[in-house]
Image (cartoon, coloured by chain):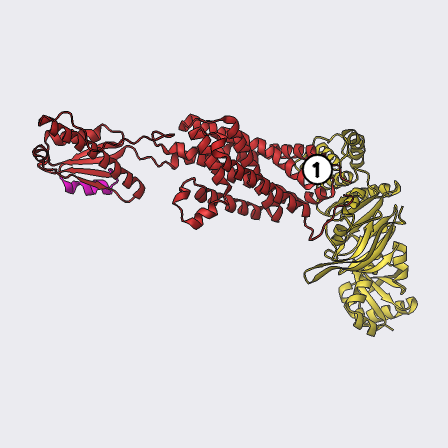
Chain colours: A red, B yellow
């Protein structure tokens, strides 16, 4: 006759806490690795392109051409590295990667401009890094555009037309991340990635270690029920991983300037749901494997790549082909990430992201339920197990 | 109250095509020390795991403490203590933390655990080492602590699977004293071992070989029931050569080497002594001593296994 209460929960929780505390490696793994990874990834995965080294070939040397060069000198997007005498001098400098872009202002540029003949300038961009190359070309284009607007307006003014409006004036305003800094975009993504991997891996060892050491048999023979074992094993890890999640949040704020705009309780709820689900996934992996090595591999395989590629962390989901988009629904990191970005960057409330919470809850219930069912079966191949005295 | 603590009828366990336990049947009386003897891989652990409810039998039935292992596994669990072959405590917990954890895991109240704590520490000889990490204890201590944890909840039956594996002789003796005292307090002890000398401590024994029970009874019964022919212990020079020579003689039934002596089984003691000295004398092998001995369990075991393995050949040689 089983008592309905969770009477054997306390001893399991106490034991897990003691074991984790005595295992310095897993303590470090759980607490400091996430912060360390955020630090490393946060700096390495920087999509911002600023201070692009630039060279200018000013063949004209007029007032107008110097005016244009000044525009590149004063922006933070470019570092004017050199003023070269002729176009042929660009190649060796760019090959050495001293510069990534070059601007060539042709002879008669100033005269043509004054005469209203639309002179062309040449932009040369190092395409060996396609991402930063495209961005650099875009910046050059934008600076030239604004310069040519200014020149047009000045020319019109000289003809006495002072009150001219350009046919279409556009102004782009970016919300939530006004400087379009990738740190803002990456910190929530890193957080979901790091938590998913670390948390799943840490519990993936938990059951399989007991199997390897033979203590699982003793637990199976004791009064501890599978659900008590799972909850007892998860509770300490939830506490520890929430701690390291906060460390990541703190680092995000201090180092990368990503503050939380939205509600903290809502953020905490999302973290608890996600962490618990990931812990459940780890336990499930642990309950179906026989050795710690296999458990580790399985935990890494099912978390690292899917969360990196398919959660929207690095690649936007809506740009993926429909089949791949469908697969992303199976990646729990996707919902957590969406919730994190909404809460941290946009300050969104539950009404805006209730669906993400619904999916997160489903993930948690599913992973815990599956591991409880799996552990309840133990190593028995019993198809119709009936509980005694039920 | 059921008559027997354990009743097993035609228990079978197959793993794919391999039959680990082949139609095993036996009964264990209450309060006795029941020894399950066999080599590694004979099916001892598989049987224990089925009786504890850790493994489902392929067919057959068994009751433990009066409960059916298939239909009432939860009640069986409550009635037994189990100590597995591998050391199965938490090495990264201290002695006292292990005791407290298992006490809680068996659903004992804190007061009940406190009451048993002193008993376990005294029994295992671990007073004063309560705070030591279990990892740092010697194997003998670990085994005694594991036994203490297995009977914390005072079960009526305790299963010990190779409890003395890898333990030094002094610790083994001490462990068997503990088993004896458990038995004296009324606990039924089901113990497996491949140390045949340990079987002498048991009240009742089954020999298991390749998944089948090949002999059973008390140690005394085993020695007299299965071995009726006299066994001679021979001390001689060049015993390996002597054994090879004697093996070919029709009047020698079985031979084996025990330490520095040779054991041979013959049909008649006096004739055996005479033929033996004559035969080895012809080879120039000096015989120092020939004694009729009481067969050991090892003699019985070897006899039964050889009987099984080379049945046809043995039958031809035997008169």
- Quadrant of the image occupied by residue A126: top left
**Chain of the residue under label 1:** B
Whether residue B167 sits left or right of residue A75 in the image: it is: right
Q: Residue furthest right?
A: B270
* The stretch drawn in magenta includes residue B55: no
* The stretch drawn in magenta includes residue A94: yes
Q: Position of residue A125 (x, y in %)?
A: 23, 41
Q: Circle 1 sits in a helix, a strand or a loop, which is it?
A: loop
Closer to us: B115 or A279: A279
Q: Position of residue A173 (x, y in %)?
A: 32, 30
Q: Residue at x 72, y 43 (%)?
A: A218
| Residue A351, placed above or below residue A282 | above
Whether residue A70 sits left or right of residue A47 in the image: it is: left
| Residue B283 visible (yes or no) | no
Number of residues whose C-alpha sits closer than 10 Å to that of mark 1, classed few (under 14), some (14–19) or many (20 or more): some
Q: Position of residue B49 (x, y in %)?
A: 74, 50
Marker count (numbered): 1
Q: Looking at the rendering, in which quadrant would you find the C terminus of chain B?
A: bottom right
| Residue B6, placed above or below residue B101 | below
Closer to us: B141 or A97: A97
Q: Which residue is mark 1?
A: B137
Closer to us: A122 or B141: A122
Majority secondary structure of magenta residues: helix
Q: Position of residue B35 (x, y in %)?
A: 82, 51
Whether residue A312 sits left or right of residue B204 in the image: it is: left
What are the residue bounds of the magenta stretch?
Answer: A86-99
| Residue A257 visible (yes or no) | yes
| Residue B232, placed above or below residue B85 | below
Q: Residue furthest bottom?
A: B316
Q: Residue at x 75, y 29 (%)?
A: B128
């Amino acid at each position: 006759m089983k008592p309905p209460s969770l009477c054997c929960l306390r001893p399991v929780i106490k034991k897990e806490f003691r074991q984790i505390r005595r295992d310095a490696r897993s303590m470090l793994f759980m607490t400091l690795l996430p912060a360390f990874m955020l630090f490393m990834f946060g700096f390495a995965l920087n999509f911002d392109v600023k201070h692009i080294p630039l060279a200018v070939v000013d063949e004209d040397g007029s007032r107008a051409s110097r005016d244009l060069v000044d525009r590149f000198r004063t922006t933070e997007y470019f570092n004017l590295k050199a003023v070269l005498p002729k176009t042929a001098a660009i190649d060796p400098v760019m090959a050495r990667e001293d510069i990534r872009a070059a601007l060539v202002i042709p002879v008669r540029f100033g005269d043509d401009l004054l005469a209203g003949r639309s002179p062309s300038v040449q932009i040369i961009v190092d395409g060996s890094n396609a991402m930063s190359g495209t961005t650099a070309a875009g910046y050059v284009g934008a600076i030239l555009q604004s310069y040519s607007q200014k020149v047009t307006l000045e020319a019109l003014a000289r003809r006495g037309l002072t009150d001219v409006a350009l046919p279409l004036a556009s102004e782009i305003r970016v919300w939530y991340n006004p400087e379009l800094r990738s740190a803002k975009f990456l910190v929530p993504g890193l957080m979901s990635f790091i938590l998913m991997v670390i948390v799943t891996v840490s519990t993936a060892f938990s059951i399989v270690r007991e199997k390897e050491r033979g203590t699982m048999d003793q637990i199976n023979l004791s009064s501890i029920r599978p659900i008590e074992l799972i909850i007892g094993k998860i509770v300490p890890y939830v506490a520890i991983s929430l701690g390291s999640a906060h460390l990541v949040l703190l680092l995000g704020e201090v180092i990368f300037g990503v503050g939380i705009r939205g509600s903290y309780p809502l953020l905490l709820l999302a973290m608890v749901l996600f962490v618990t689900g990931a812990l459940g996934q780890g336990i499930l992996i642990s309950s179906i494997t026989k050795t710690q090595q296999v458990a580790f591999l399985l935990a890494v395989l099912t978390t690292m790549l899917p969360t990196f590629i398919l959660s929207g962390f690095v690649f936007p989901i809506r740009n993926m082909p429909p089949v791949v988009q469908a697969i992303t629904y199976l990646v729990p990191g996707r919902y957590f990430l969406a919730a994190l970005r909404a809460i941290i960057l946009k300050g969104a409330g539950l009404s805006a992201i209730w669906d993400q919470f619904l999916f997160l809850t489903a993930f948690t219930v599913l992973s815990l339920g599956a591991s409880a069912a799996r552990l309840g079966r133990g190593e028995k191949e019993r198809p119709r197990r009936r509980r005694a005295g039920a | 109250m059921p008559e027997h603590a354990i009743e097993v009828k035609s228990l079978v366990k197959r793993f794919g095509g391999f039959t680990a336990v082949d139609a095993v049947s036996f009964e264990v009386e209450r309060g006795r020390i029941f020894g399950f003897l066999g080599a590694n891989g004979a099916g001892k652990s598989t049987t224990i795991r089925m009786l504890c409810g850790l493994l489902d039998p392929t067919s057959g039935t068994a009751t433990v403490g009066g409960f059916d292992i298939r239909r009432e596994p939860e009640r069986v669990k409550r009635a037994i203590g189990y100590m597995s072959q591998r050391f199965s405590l938490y090495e990264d917990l201290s002695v006292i933390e292990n005791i407290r954890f298992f006490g809680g895991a068996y659903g004992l109240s804190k007061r009940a655990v406190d009451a048993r704590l002193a008993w376990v520490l005294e029994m295992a000889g671990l007073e004063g080492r309560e705070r030591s990490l279990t990892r740092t204890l010697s194997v003998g201590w670990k085994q005694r602590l594991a036994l203490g944890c297995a009977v914390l909840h005072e079960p009526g039956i305790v299963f010990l699977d190779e409890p003395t594996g890898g333990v030094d002789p002094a610790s083994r003796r001490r462990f068997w004293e503990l088993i004896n005292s458990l038995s004296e307090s009324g606990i039924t002890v089901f113990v497996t071992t491949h140390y045949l000398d340990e079987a002498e401590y048991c009240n009742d024994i089954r020999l298991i070989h390749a998944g089948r029970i090949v002999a059973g009874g008390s140690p005394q019964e085993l020695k007299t029931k299965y071995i009726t022919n006299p066994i001679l212990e021979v001390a001689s020079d060049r015993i390996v050569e002597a054994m090879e020579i004697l093996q070919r003689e029709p009047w020698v039934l079985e031979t084996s080497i025990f330490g520095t002596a040779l054991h041979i089984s013959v049909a008649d003691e006096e004739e055996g002594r005479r033929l033996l000295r004559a035969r080895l004398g012809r080879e120039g092998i000096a015989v120092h001593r020939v004694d009729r001995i009481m067969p050991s369990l090892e003699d019985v075991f070897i006899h039964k296994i050889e009987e099984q393995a080379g049945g046809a050949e043995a039958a031809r040689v035997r008169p």
